[in-house]
Image (cartoon, rainbow, N blue to C red):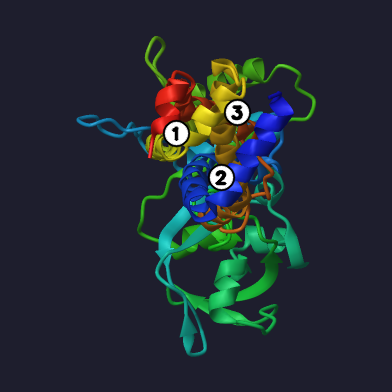
Amino acid sequence: MNIKENIAEGLRSIKGNLLRTVLTALIISLGITSLVGILTAIDGIQSSVDNSFSGLGANSFDIRNRPAMQVRREGQREKRFKNIDFRQASRYKALFSAKGKVSLKTNVTNNAIAKYESKKTNPNVRLLGIDDNFVELKGYKIAEGRNFSTNEFTNAINVCFLGVDVIDQLFEKSNPLNKEIIVSGIKLKVIGILAKKGNMMGGGDDRVIMVPLETGRKMAVGRNLTFDITTSSTKVKNLDDFMEEARGVMRKVRMDPIGMDDSFSIDRSDSIAKSFENITSSLQLGGFVIGFITLLGAAIALMNIMMVSVTERTREIGIRKSLGATPGRILQQFLIEAIVICLLGGIGGIILAIPIGNLIAQGISSGNASFIIPWLWMTVGIIICVLVGLFSGIYPAFKASKMDPVEALRYE
């Protein structure tokens, strides 16, 4: 009996026990769905991060009073410096503007409530005060309307841009341009609509209201604001040297003593994306372990079913051996049968995993993730299916190959 005949015999055996085969393949399918689905979702979330930072310049960095992304451990306090005030931020911009574009931004509040007629937003809207370079340097685009004018920046005019999430809550299908909303008791005229930007953590970049920097300062009267600074240059080849030059200027502005650490944080604009790449590597390992444990349970179930199959077909094995089938051919037949069942389940699992993984990624990233066809994980899934088939089938197949043909023929 050659390999082709063994495959045909395995398929006939599978067809003869269709319900048992379907249930077994379903167990394998769920394991592969878990494995490939989790890894696909992680790849999709990573694509969301890449999309979020794709609009930022390669030669840009941020100066803040806190790290851009900090993993806190138990017993540790979050690293935070004294606020960067408006005078310091403005002085840095004046000193460094000749070397690159500089943008200033302040979070007036992270829990603003915007009102229009009888409608209002949830108290989780970010109100930002921005300068003339912020929209460009941070990858925002104005979908409708216009940018702030010089007069509006200078004289703290009550105008604003709205993110799409705020528009959905206040205006539904009507156009918000040139209409007035109320934020923190102040009327703001909507002159611009921001294009959907998305965010890896659930759309925070679209749940935003932007006002001119001086307007933001006016709305925050009596509160101590901190200002974030973004610097960019298209002419710089070595960003690290450029950042060190900016660090020196900021230390001068902050009057940091020589030999002391910086009183501010300076990070590349893509540092969060790079940090998240390290996180996704850990998530992929965790997802692989979870999927592998699920497949291990499926492999044990398949081994049990193959043992039952060997017992049921004892007389068949005796007849084959009496007709000249070698132990190697018997072993091969049952191994192929186990592998075929695993491959059927694996293919079904992959078909389920792709939409499920992408739906999870889209849900977490608020629709900003790209649709992923995980060719690598599909290939890994198929290879694992073959290995599971070998693992599950090797002992039952070995047991079948070692049967005594005379005793097998006597079996009732």
Q: Earlier in the sequence, mark 2 or mark 3?
A: 2
Residue drawn 60% across and 21% down?
A: 325
Q: Earlier in the sequence, mark 2 or mark 1?
A: 1
Residue drawn 37% across and 14% down?
A: 260
Where residue 292 sits, quadrant-wise, is top left
Q: Is residue 122 above or below residue 81?
A: below
Q: Earlier in the sequence, mark 1 or mark 3?
A: 1
Q: Residue beneath label 1, please?
A: 314
Give the class, few, some or many, for how many residues have Cα within 10 Å of label 2's Cα (few <14, many ≥20).
many
Where residue 254 sits, quadrant-wise, is top left
Residue 23, which numbered label? Answer: none
Q: Residue beneath label 3, please?
A: 383
Q: Is residue 229 above or below residue 365?
A: above
Residue drawn 64% across and 34% down?
A: 231
Give the class, few, some or many, for how many residues have Cα within 10 Å of label 1's Cα (few <14, many ≥20).
many
- 250 vs 288, nearest the viewer: 288
Residue drawn 66% across and 60% down?
A: 196
Q: Residue beneath label 2, please?
A: 345
* Residue 387 spot, x, y in % from top left: 53, 26
How far apart marks 2 and 1 lie (CA) works out to 26 Å
Number of marks present in the image shown? 3
Q: Nearer the viewer, mark 1 or mark 3?
A: 1
* Residue 377 spot, x, y in % from top left: 61, 34
Q: Tell me the kind of residue under disc 2.
A: Gly
Instruction: Find numbered disc 1 in the image and state the secondary structure of the residue it sits on.
Output: helix
In the rendered image, the quadrant that contains the C terminus is top left
Q: Nearer the viewer, mark 2 or mark 3?
A: 2
How far apart marks 2 and 3 lie (CA) works out to 13 Å
Query: Is disc 1 in contact with disc 3, using a CB cutoff of under 8 Å?
Result: no
How far apart marks 1 and 3 lie (CA) works out to 30 Å
- 51 vs 294, nearest the viewer: 294
